[in-house]
Image (tube, rainbow, N blue to C red):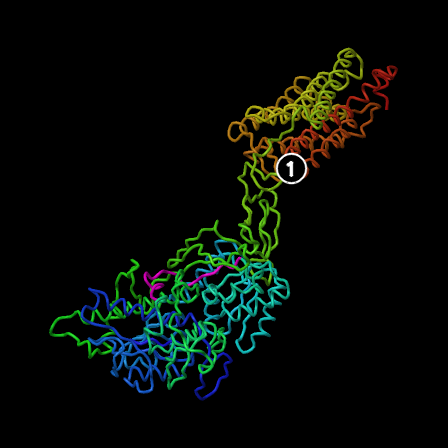
């Protein structure tokens, strides 16, 4: 078993030759001792690998790919001559630390994805399993390309999806992104974009940063954040890049943004403890490698002492740095001898500067007294409250141990010797690893991966000043478990920050996307009449049912107001007054005619027809009243019948009068004396009855087969629905009007023909004018009737009835009444017959 930590130089310069690395990275040192602790714990285990002791060799790669490759090849090849480190055979009956030069069958390391890909491709033909604790590139899940690779950290696909689901959950519709310009950043943002597709989340901008030009790129990204309206910013970068970005934002006083962190920097103490970035970094919400505790690990770290580990050069350098004394047991490596520097995955293919101070030269340090101890020291190195990467290393060791246990637990005939383990056999058993950890977790590989588990963390301000890391939830696969009430946002409140391109459309309006812009940018358009939206951010307005209409705010459908021509409205009162007045005037004329019935004016041209004409005119005025008021089944039937029959009776009387006038003058010609016998009083009454009976028959058939019925007319009246009599049969109504028009036109033609007959009082002239007005009114009625909306259809018909009735009354009877009442001297037979 092999662990390859990494170390880097504080001021890194990429050189083709090996240069010593300096500086100490405590996190990587803790990773190393997590592996050592796990090995020692397994060796004490009674049921796991009984009778077999695990050993390990540690080689420092200094975070450089060529060194990592050379170290890996030397270990799998069994070459330990150039590696001075704690070593033993991977599985043997020897004690750890004893000499052993046989090839190791498994490697734990390759913290960077680039290193992991390199080692997996090179060692793939040898079938040597590689277990990484930090390499999270999704590409490493490809079993065809990397069949010998395993890892105890989830693929970045899951953290990108988790961040996307956070954005969806908190309705952050408008976000910006800053990412490192490598596979880690580009793959993360690609997965994020795929996950938010169609979920109402859009990216305002994507800024990339490069390690080589981080100062310039950080300023450019900070300017983009400052200029953007997005209040939520995603960052997929390494913590040193994020720190430089936060320093730039602090200079610009941009402290109102909510940052969402990837696991590459979400737990970085370097930013958390820096007062220069605390205002910008407050409220950070991030995805972190899941944390756990390892029972006994803190005691193990506190018990570490160079006296008890004289060959541990890594511990010796740590001791010298922390206590300022020389232990005399610093190891020397053919690979650059130095303490450990962790090169985590993702953000960069280049090592970062060490945060530790340059080690003092051993010669200038006083010797240690031996009383130095970590027992009572509060130090980050001994803090095991939230183990993340170290716990991944711990799991990797246990996974290897269980695979080895499975390999050695075989039939006698096919058992492998602990001293002669073939990597391909171990690889086969690695694929089937399934066990329960000492912490009670079920562990297994899904191909190269383990089930995705993350912590959700929040950076919260404290009264003391520095920010603190608080776990506020966790991710289990695709499920988010989040305690929202525990989150402290960038506004230092419990209110979720709002980040939108356009404010949500209020109820009563719908959103309209802006052309050429993301779908999250839109305008709000009020709903049209008759449509509503009763939710915030509605994409469409819904039409109201036919019997409902939208309210003034367009947020609810309300029943339409029932409307009809009533007696108590202004129009109804006006028409009623006109109808009653017409009927009253007609009655008055009738009374005048009855009183002066013996006078020549009244008796001229059959006084009986004059009385019948006045009666029919009165019916015409009164029938208009039937059209006013709430329509009912019987009123709808009666109004059209009353209208049709009353007017036909009226026109029939005029037609017969006109015929009689023509007959009288024709009979005065020689040889035509017998013509009047066909137009006596009886024949006149019979003719009127005959003409009227035809209309009665038409109305009877129409009303019996397809009568008008009350109908709710939606029309164009908006919130008003008109109750009117709908013509179920247009043919019936057309026949009624057609027959009336036929009689009227016949009467007009005959009266026009008789208008110049020699008489001082020629009634044909009066009939001509009256029928001319009648025809004009009803010709104008047709288009007005068709084009009038709602209840005004009824008003138009009433107006036509009243106008034509007044026309007939005034044109025919006004001159007669004038003579009877004001010119009685002309009311003589001699005057009437004068030419």
- Vertical side of 478 occupied by 326: above or below: below
The residue range painted magenta reads 283-300
- Vertical side of 334 occupied by 292: above or below: above
Residue 290 belongs to magenta span: yes
**Figure label count:** 1
Residue 299 belongs to magenta span: yes
Q: Nearer the viewer, residue 347 or 96?
A: 96
In the picture, the quarter occupied by the N terminus is bottom left
Image spot of residue 23 (x, y percent)? 46, 77
Image spot of residue 551 (x, y percent)? 60, 38
In the picture, the quarter occupied by the C terminus is top right
Q: Say which element carries label 1.
A: loop
Local packing at callout 1 (Cα closer than 10 Å; few below 14, some 14-19, many 20+) is some
Q: Is residue 417 left or right of residue 574?
A: left
Report if residue 519 is visible in the image: no
Q: Is residue 739 left or right of residue 451?
A: right
- Vertical side of 823 occupied by 368: above or below: below
Q: Which residue is disc 1 drawn over? A: 789
Q: Residue furthest left?
A: 413
């Amino acid at each position: 078993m092999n662990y390859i930590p990494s170390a880097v130089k504080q001021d890194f310069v990429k050189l083709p030759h090996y240069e010593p690395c300096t500086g100490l990275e405590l996190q990587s040192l803790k990773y190393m001792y997590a592996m050592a602790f796990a090995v020692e714990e397994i060796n004490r285990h009674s049921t796991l690998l009984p009778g077999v002791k695990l050993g390990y060799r540690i080689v420092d790669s200094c975070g450089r790919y060529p060194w990592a490759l050379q170290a890996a090849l030397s270990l799998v090849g069994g070459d330990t001559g150039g590696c001075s480190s704690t070593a033993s055979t991977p599985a043997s009956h020897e004690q750890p630390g004893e000499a052993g030069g046989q090839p190791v069958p498994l490697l734990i390391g390759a913290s960077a994805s680039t290193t992991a890909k390199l080692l997996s491709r090179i060692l793939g033909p040898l079938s040597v399993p590689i277990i990484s604790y930090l390499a999270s590139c999704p590409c490493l899940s490809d079993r065809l390309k990397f069949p010998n690779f395993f890892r105890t950290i989830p693929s970045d696909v899951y953290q990108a999806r988790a961040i996307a689901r956070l954005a969806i959950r908190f309705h952050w519709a408008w976000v910006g992104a800053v990412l490192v310009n490598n596979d880690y950043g580009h793959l993360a943002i690609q997965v994020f974009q795929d996950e938010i597709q169609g979920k109402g989340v859009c990216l305002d901008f994507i800024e990339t940063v490069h390690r080589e030009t981080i100062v310039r790129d950080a300023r450019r990204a900070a300017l983009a954040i400052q200029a953007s309206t997005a209040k939520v910013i995603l960052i997929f970068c390494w913590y040193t890049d994020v720190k430089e970005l936060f320093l730039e934002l602090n200079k610009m006083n941009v402290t109102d943004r909510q940052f969402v962190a990837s696991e590459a920097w979400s737990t970085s103490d370097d930013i958390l403890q820096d007062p220069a970035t605390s205002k910008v970094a407050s409220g950070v919400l991030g995805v972190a490698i899941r944390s756990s505790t390892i029972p006994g690990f803190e005691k193990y770290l506190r018990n570490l002492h160079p006296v008890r580990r004289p060959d541990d050069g890594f511990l010796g350098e740590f001791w010298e740095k922390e206590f300022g004394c020389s232990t005399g047991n610093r190891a020397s490596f053919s690979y650059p001898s130095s303490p450990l520097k962790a090169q985590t995955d993702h953000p960069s293919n280049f090592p970062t500067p060490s945060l530790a101070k340059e080690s003092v030269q051993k010669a200038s340090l006083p010797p240690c007294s031996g009383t130095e101890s970590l027992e009572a020291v509060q130090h980050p190195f001994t803090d095991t409250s939230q183990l993340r990467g170290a716990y991944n290393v711990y799991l990797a060791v246990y996974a290897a141990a269980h695979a080895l246990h499975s390999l050695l637990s075989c039939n006698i005939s096919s058992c492998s010797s602990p001293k002669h383990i073939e990597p391909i056999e171990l690889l086969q058993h690695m694929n089937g690893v399934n066990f329960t950890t000492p912490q009670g977790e079920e562990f297994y590989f899904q191909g190269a991966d383990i089930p995705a588990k993350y912590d959700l963390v929040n950076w919260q301000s404290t009264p003391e000043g520095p920010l603190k890391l608080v776990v506020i939830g966790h991710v289990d696969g695709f499920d988010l478990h989040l305690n929202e009430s525990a989150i402290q946002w960038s506004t230092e409140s419990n209110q979720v920050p709002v980040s939108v391109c356009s404010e949500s459309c209020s109820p009563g309006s719908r959103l309209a996307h802006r052309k050429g812009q993301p779908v999250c940018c839109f305008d709000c358009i009020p709903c049209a009449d008759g449509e509503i939206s009763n939710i915030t951010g509605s994409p469409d307005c819904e039409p109201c049912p036919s019997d409902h209409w939208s309210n003034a705010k367009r947020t609810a459908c309300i029943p339409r107001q029932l409307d009809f021509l009533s007696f108590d409205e202004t129009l109804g009162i006006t028409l009623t007054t006109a109808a009653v007045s017409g009927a009253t005037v007609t009655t008055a004329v009738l009374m005048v005619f009855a009183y002066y019935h013996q006078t020549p004016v009244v008796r001229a041209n059959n006084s009986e027809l004059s009385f019948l004409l006045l009666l029919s005119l009165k019916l015409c005025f009164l029938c208009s009243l039937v059209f006013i008021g709430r329509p009912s089944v019987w009123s709808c039937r009666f109004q059209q019948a009353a209208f049709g029959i009353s007017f036909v009776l009226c026109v029939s009387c005029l037609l017969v009068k006109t015929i009689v006038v023509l007959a009288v003058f024709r009979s005065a010609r020689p040889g035509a004396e017998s013509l009047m016998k066909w137009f006596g009083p009886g024949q006149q009454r019979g003719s009127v009855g005959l003409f009227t009976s035809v209309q009665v028959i038409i109305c009877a058939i129409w009303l019996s087969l397809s009568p008008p019925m009350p109908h709710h007319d939606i029309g164009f009246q908006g919130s008003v629905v008109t109750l009117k009599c709908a013509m179920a049969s247009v043919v019936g109504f057309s026949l009624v009007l057609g027959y009336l028009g036929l009689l009227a036109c016949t009467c007009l033609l005959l009266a026009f023909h008789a208008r110049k007959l020699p008489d001082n009082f020629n009634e044909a002239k009066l009939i001509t004018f009256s029928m001319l007005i009648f025809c004009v009114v009803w010709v104008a009625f047709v288009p007005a009737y068709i084009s009038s909306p709602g209840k005004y259809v009824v008003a138009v018909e009433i107006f036509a009835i009243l106008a034509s009735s007044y026309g007939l009354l005034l044109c025919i009877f006004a001159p007669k009444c004038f003579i009877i009442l004001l010119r009685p001297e002309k009311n003589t037979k001699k005057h009437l017959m004068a030419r």
